[in-house]
Structure formats: structure tokens, C-alpha cells
Amino acid sequence: MTRRRQRRTLKPLPGGRVEYKGRSFINFCSNDYLGLAQDERIVQALKEAADEYGVGSGASQLITGYSEAHEQLEQQLADFTGYDRALFFSNGYMANLGVITALADRHTSLYLDRLAHASLIDATRLSRARYQRYAHNSVADLMARLADDQQQRRLVVSEGVFSMEGDRAPLIDIAQCCQQQKALFYLDDAHGFGVLGEQGRGSRSAQGLDTDAVPLQMATFGKALGVSGAFVAGSHELIETILQRSRTLTYSTAPPPALARATATALTIVIAEQWRRDKLEALVQYWRRVAHEQELPLLESDTAIQPLLIGADADALAVSESLMEHGLLVSAIRPPTVPEGEARLRITLTSAHEQADIDRLVQALAASL
Ligand SMILES: *Cc1c(COP(=O)(O)O)cnc(C)c1O
């Protein structure tokens, strides 16, 4: 069976809504978890920095594309996350490609969670490392595989919050396992950064781990920060290695300096405005309560990602289409993004939503399922 995917041409509207074909829809597909993608202050920062720097950076970071705006953002990220140093990448996909190919080669054993994001899988393949995929969130399986492997250089990769499940990785146990087995732990916190932990420091902070326990982590700016780009943070030594070896950094034009400025403003807002995280958390709890009352097929998740497991592709598509008739945008996620027979509706909540939006969603789902 072929699974044709289509793009929709949308325009953002306030209040977690989008315009599509002249109609307004509540958007339950966005990763703009804190409702910042249209924030006036970030827009203003982008405009002012564009007046100062222009648009393009003109070259790779290692040639002449690196500016004070990039440098300041990296410093701000290092201070905020508590690592020695941070590196700015064009996006999360490029960060994962750059980091993993910099740190792993054919003499490395790499361990990936079975549900790892496509960018991590592609990065792993490109690195030519020998790799294994351990059972989802199973530290016992990871431990057994590591104990069985004599390879000197070992890299373990997990997400903090899984993008299609919404569940969190057991970082305390993974970190302990890696320390015991002398494997390097790389955390992809695309869905935790900005949302979880103290001031939005992410999954590591939320689980009370220090930077030694998670020596290397990345996150994207395209999700909770509402911007675009990504960073990786770690020790001086690790970051220097990545800077020297990462081909996605060396052979690609640096992101616009104005974007770095806008990201710095977004980060300041994320840190300062705790109410956004509090509101999101309250909405998640409210959704789970009312969805449970309606016996909707919830997965185990307490994050902004709240999938409903449907099963067959056609059923997931049919429900998604029926929700559109109710003015609700919810994406149907099908294989190969998720395993066969596990098609789902991937509902994401953001702090731009209100309880009334969730009421509408639950009523429409109860009528469509
Ligand atoms: C979205 C995502 C990425 C890629 O980040 P972009 O900045 O969108 O390229 C990487 N890893 C995970 C887990 C993601 O969800």
C-alpha cells in the first residue's frame, strides 16, 4: 500500500488556531508548545537584528558566517543548561547528523531506543557505526546489550520525551547504566527543552540529573521556543570535537544572525514566563481527565504530546477528516513514522489553547470514534 502524504497550505492565527481554505481551525498538531511562534517580542527582536545584520550569514560558521549574535546565544545556552559550552546548528536534524557522525565511526557501537526519531536513525546510518536498537525505554535490555559488547567506544542515544508517544525516558536509569558501562550518553531533548524542568531546562533537570550524568544533549528551537535552529551542549572537549568534525556545521551556511537574536529573546521569555508551562500542564491534566471519562484510547503520557491509538491507517485518517469538519486539526500519524498497525492521532496541546478548545475536541472525538 502506498501512503501518499500531502501538505496543507496554512496561515497562523492567534489562540492556537490556523486558517485553512478560508476557515479557522483549532490546531492540535503544532509543537509550538508555549505559544511563542508568533510572539510580538520575538518578532521585534528578529526585525531589529535584521536591520543590524541583514538576512544571510554569507558563509559557514567556520569561514565568516559566525557573528556576535551567534556567540552570545551559545553563551546564554551554556549558562542556562549548565554545560561548559553550546554549539548552534541550523536545525535539530542537522545537529543530530553532525553530532553522531562526529562521535561515532565504524569502530563505535551505538545503541538507540527502538522508537528513536528518524534524524537519529539517519545519523547513525551515516556514521557507519555498528548499531543496535533496544526495546523502548527498557534499561534492562540496554544493560544486557552493553554488557555483552566488548567494543571500546560506545554511544547510547535516547530522547527525553518521545515524539510519537509523549512518554518520557527513564533518564536516571539510563545515565547510571551508561556510567557503569562507560558508554557516552547523548540525549535528544527536542520535546522536553523549554517545557519540562526548572525554568524549562528540560528532561535532564526534570529528573534531577546533573550534567555529568548526561554529558551531551541537544534540543531544537523549532518546538517550545517557537523559532528555528538547534543546539548541542556538553564539555569543552566534546563540543570542540564536534565543532572540528561536524560536517553539517562545516559544510553548510550558518543560520542568519537575526535568527540567533530572535532565539535569544525566545529563550529569555521561556525562562521568565513560568505561567506558560503551568498553563500547559493544567491543560494536559484537564484533557486526560475528560478524555478518560469518554474512554478515549489514551497512551501513557503526561506531556504535551497526547496520542490516541487507533490502529488501522484508514481509521486514523477517517477520524482526522471527521475532526476537520468540526473545525479541529489533528494529524493522523501512520507507518513508517510509527510501527505497523499503530496508526494514531497525534494530539499536541499548547499554552495557547483554552479548556473550551479541549471540550470541543473531546466532544468531536466522542462523536467520531
Ligand atoms: C523535531 C525533532 C528533531 C529535529 O529537529 P528540527 O529542528 O525540527 O530539525 C530531532 N529529534 C527529535 C526527537 C525531534 O522530535
Image (cartoon, rainbow, N blue to C red):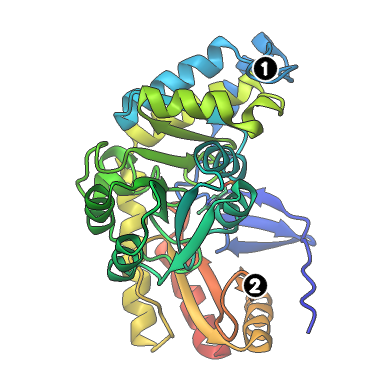
Instruction: From the top left corner, tell me how far across and down residue 171 is, in percent.
Output: 28, 55
Residue 332, numbered label:
none
Instruction: From the top left corner, tell me how far across and down residue 324 is, in percent.
Output: 67, 74
**Crowding near pointer 2: few (<14 within 10 Å), some, many (20+)?**
few
For the C terminus, which image quadrant? bottom right
Q: Amino acid at mark 2?
A: Pro
State the residue at coordinates (55%, 64%).
28
Between 9 and 129, the one nearer to me in the picture: 129
Q: Tell me the residue that label 1 is attached to.
A: 50
For the N terminus, which image quadrant? bottom right
Q: Earlier in the sequence, mark 1 or mark 2?
A: 1
Q: Circle 1 — which element?
A: helix
Residue 19 vertical placement versus 249 (above, below) = below
Between 207 and 143, the one nearer to me in the picture: 143
Q: Is residue 81 left or right of residue 319?
A: left
Q: Circle 2 — which element?
A: loop
Whether disc 2's CB lies below 8 Å from ligand 1 is answered: no
Structural distance between the alpha carbons of marks 1 and 2 = 40 Å
Q: Tell me the residue that label 2 is attached to.
A: 336
Q: Amino acid at mark 1?
A: Ala
Residue 89 vertical placement versus 52 (above, below) = below
